[in-house]
Image (tube, helix red, strand yellow):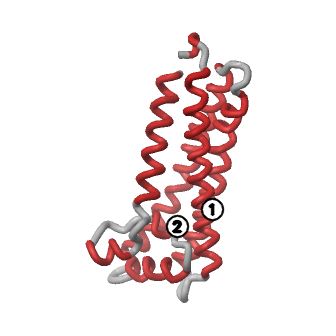
Amino acid sequence: MRKFLIFAVTTSALLVVSLLCSTTACPTAEMRFGVHPNIMCLELPITGLRADATLALWRAGDGAIASAARRDTVADYGFLVFYGATMAVTGWLARKGSVPGASAPALALIGAPLAAALADAIENQGIFRMLAGTGPTSDVVAFATSIFAALKFALLIVWIRAAARLVPDLPATAR
């Protein structure tokens, strides 16, 4: 169990950091360098203006990129169910093997991924609204989508932190 938690913590940390770093230049890097479009640009647009810049780029030509973004967002529902359930079950298993006093991190290992999956689902609704819009994107929709995306990532970081804190507490029999 200890090796699995170490693997889960490391993998999750690398994933969260790489995803957050990928939005730093949206959409200017896509326009300037021809970088493959990144759905993260609509997850964390913060303003309607940034969302509109990304959407204009994606809708150019035949609109295939915007269509792919819709497909990716639909597919994300399967992913959020998978990661929410997998990470929560991992937390539940870790809680069963934890020592007294480690219940707070173990409970975070169960609750944080479930709440993150819910925030992810709400964020996806914002992405769908932006993709379906024909006029300028509302700053409220862009900001709310960004808040729920940030909440999702914060909760995943909570999970990483709780898992890292719990690993040394596991009894020798659980390792």
* Residue 100 image label: none
- Looking at the image, residue 25 lies above or below residue 6: below
Asked if the residue under mark 2 is in contact with the one under mark 1, i.e. CB atoms within 8 Å, the reply is: no
- Looking at the image, residue 98 lies above or below residue 125: above
Q: Residue at x 67, y 31 (%)?
A: 106
Question: Splitting the image into 4 quarters, where does residue 69 fall?
Answer: bottom left
The kind of residue on which mark 1 rests is Phe
Label 1 packing within 10 angstroms: few (<14), some (14-19), many (20+): many
Q: Residue at x 60, y 57 (%)?
A: 120
Q: Residue at x 61, y 80 (%)?
A: 139
Q: Nearer the viewer, residue 127 or 5?
A: 5
Question: Splitting the image into 4 quarters, where does residue 142 fall?
Answer: bottom right
- Looking at the image, residue 121 lies above or below residue 16: below
Question: Which residue is identified by label 1?
Answer: 148
Question: Which residue is identified by label 2?
Answer: 44
- Looking at the image, residue 51 lies above or below residue 20: below
The kind of residue on which mark 2 rests is Leu
